[in-house]
Image (cartoon, rainbow, N blue to C red):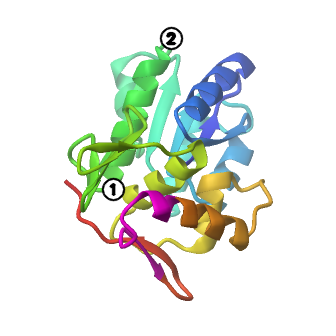
Amino acid sequence: MRVLVVEDDPRIAGDVAAALQAAGYVVDVETNGEEAWFRGDTEDYAAIVLDLGLPGMDGLSVLKRWRHGGRSVPVLVLTARGSWSERVEGIDAGADDYLPKPFRVEELLARLRAIIRRSAGQAGPVFHAGAVCLDPRLMKVAVDGVPVALSALEYRLLAFLMVNSGRVVSQQELIDHVYGHDNAQDANTLEVLLGRVRRKLPRSLIETRRGFGYLVAGRRE
C-alpha cells in the first residue's frame, strides 16, 4: 500500500520512510506544504502521515484543503505541538489520529494500521477473505491456518486487495500501490506477479473483471 509522508525534518522523514518501507508500504516523501497538498489532492494513497509545521503551507491548512476538496484519505498528524487545544483543532480539521513528537516508530505503525483498517470498515486487526487470513502487524498470510510464504511484492499486492475487499481495484491503481507511482512497471509485470500470488492461494480469491480490474470478494471480519 502507498503512503505519503509529509515532514520537513530530513532525519524524521527518513526514519519514518524507512520504517514504513520495512513494514511493507510504498512510501513517497514531501517536505513542503504546497507540494504535499497537490500530491495528496491528485494522487491515490492508502494513508498520509502529516506534520503540521511545514514551509509553504502549514499542515493544518493542507489538511483542511484536502477535506474541503472531498479527499477522504486517512491522515495521521505528527507534530511537536502537544497542547490539547491543538490536538482538538487537528482532529476537527479532519485528522483521523494525532501523534505528538517525540514518538516511537512502533506506535506510529500501529496507529497507521488502525486508521487504514477503520477506513476499510474493518473492526479487528486481521483481514479475512474466505480461507485466507492476512495479519498486517506481522506481515503474515495463512490459508486455513497454514502459513503461506509470500515475497514483499506478493504480500503488498495481496494486502492492498484485501484491505479493499469488495471493491474492484483498477490495474493502474494496483500498479501504483505495489510498485510506486514513479516506478515504471507495466500491466504485463503486474500479471506475472498476480499469477505467482494465485498459485500460492485459492485461485478463486482474486477475480479478474475484464476492462475494470481485480476484486477480492471475500467478507471482512
Residue at position x 43%, y 48% in the image: 74
In the image, 140 versus 105, the foreground residue is 140
Given this view, does label 1 or label 2 mark the residue nearer the observer?
A: 1
Q: Position of residue 151 (x, y in %)?
A: 56, 44
Q: What element carries label 2?
A: loop
Q: Residue 102 carries which label?
A: 2
Q: Position of residue 129 (x, y in %)?
A: 28, 60
The quadrant holding residue 52 is: top right
Asked if the magenta segment contains residue 205, the reply would be yes
How far, Cα to Cα, is label 1 from label 2?
28 Å
Is residue 172 visible in this depiction of the protein?
yes
Q: Position of residue 108 (x, y in %)?
A: 45, 25
Asked if the magenta segment contains residue 143, the reply would be no
Q: In the displayed structure, does residue 194 sit left or right of residue 93? A: right
In the image, 94 versus 72, the foreground residue is 72
The magenta segment is 197-208
In the image, 102 versus 159, the foreground residue is 159
Question: Label 1: few (<14), some or many (≥20) within 10 Å?
Answer: some
Q: In the displayed structure, does residue 86 sit left or right of residue 64? A: left
Q: Earlier in the sequence, mark 1 or mark 2?
A: 2
Question: Label 2: few (<14), some or many (≥20) within 10 Å?
Answer: few
The reply to whether callout 1 and callout 2 are in contact (CB within 8 Å) is no
| Residue labelled with disc 1 | 120
Is residue 92 visible in this depiction of the protein?
no
Q: Which amino acid does label 2 sit on?
A: Pro
Q: Which amino acid does label 1 sit on?
A: Ala
